[in-house]
Image (cartoon, helix red, strand yellow):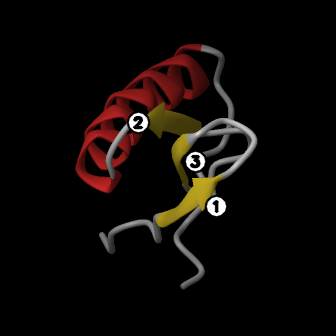
Amino acid sequence: MKDDRINIFYSDEDEGYIADIPDLKYCSAFGETPELALQQVQIAKTAWLEVAKAAGKPIPQPKY
């Protein structure tokens, strides 16, 4: 299985970094540093996958 693409960018509005996984709709996280945003989005990814599996939803394959 391939890894999902993770985008990390600075948000002036939030005054911190946002990390998101485009293949997992609405899966994103915030951190004061890029490293912290990455750690937090990994936690969000785990939760996203657990909820999708429990609900019987399909898990999308990485596109990137």
| Circles 3 and 1: CB atoms closer than 8 Å | no
Q: Which mark is residue 31?
A: 2
Helix, strand or loop status at disc 1: loop
**Which dot, 3 or 1, sits closer to the camera?**
1
Q: Earlier in the sequence, mark 2 or mark 1?
A: 1
In space, the residues marked 2 and 3 are separated at their CA atoms by 25 Å
Q: Which mark is residue 59?
A: 3
Q: Quadrant of the C terminus?
A: bottom right
Toward the viewer: 24 or 12? 12
Helix, strand or loop status at disc 3: loop
Toward the viewer: 57 or 22? 22
Please determine whether, in this image, residue 42 is positioned above or below residue 2: above
- At x 38% / y 43%, what residue is drawn? 37
**Which dot, 2 or 1, sits closer to the camera?**
2
Instruction: Give the crowd class for mark 3: few <14, some 14-19, many >=20 residues within 10 Å.
Output: few
Residue that extends furthest to the bottom in the rendered view of this protein? 64
- Please state which amino acid type lies under the numbered disc 1: Asp
In space, the residues marked 2 and 1 are separated at their CA atoms by 20 Å
Q: Which mark is residue 23?
A: 1
Count how many numbered circles sit on residues in the image. 3
Q: Where is residue 12 shown, x and y percent of the image?
A: 69, 50
Q: Say left or right for 5 vs 36.
A: right
Toward the viewer: 14 or 19? 14
- At x 43% / y 22%, what residue is drawn? 47
Name the quadrant containing residue 52. top right
Q: Where is residue 32 shown, x and y percent of the image?
A: 38, 37
Q: Say left or right for 43 vs 35.
A: right
Q: Earlier in the sequence, mark 2 or mark 3?
A: 2
In space, the residues marked 3 and 1 are separated at their CA atoms by 9 Å
- Please state which amino acid type lies under the numbered disc 2: Gly
- Please state which amino acid type lies under the numbered disc 3: Ile
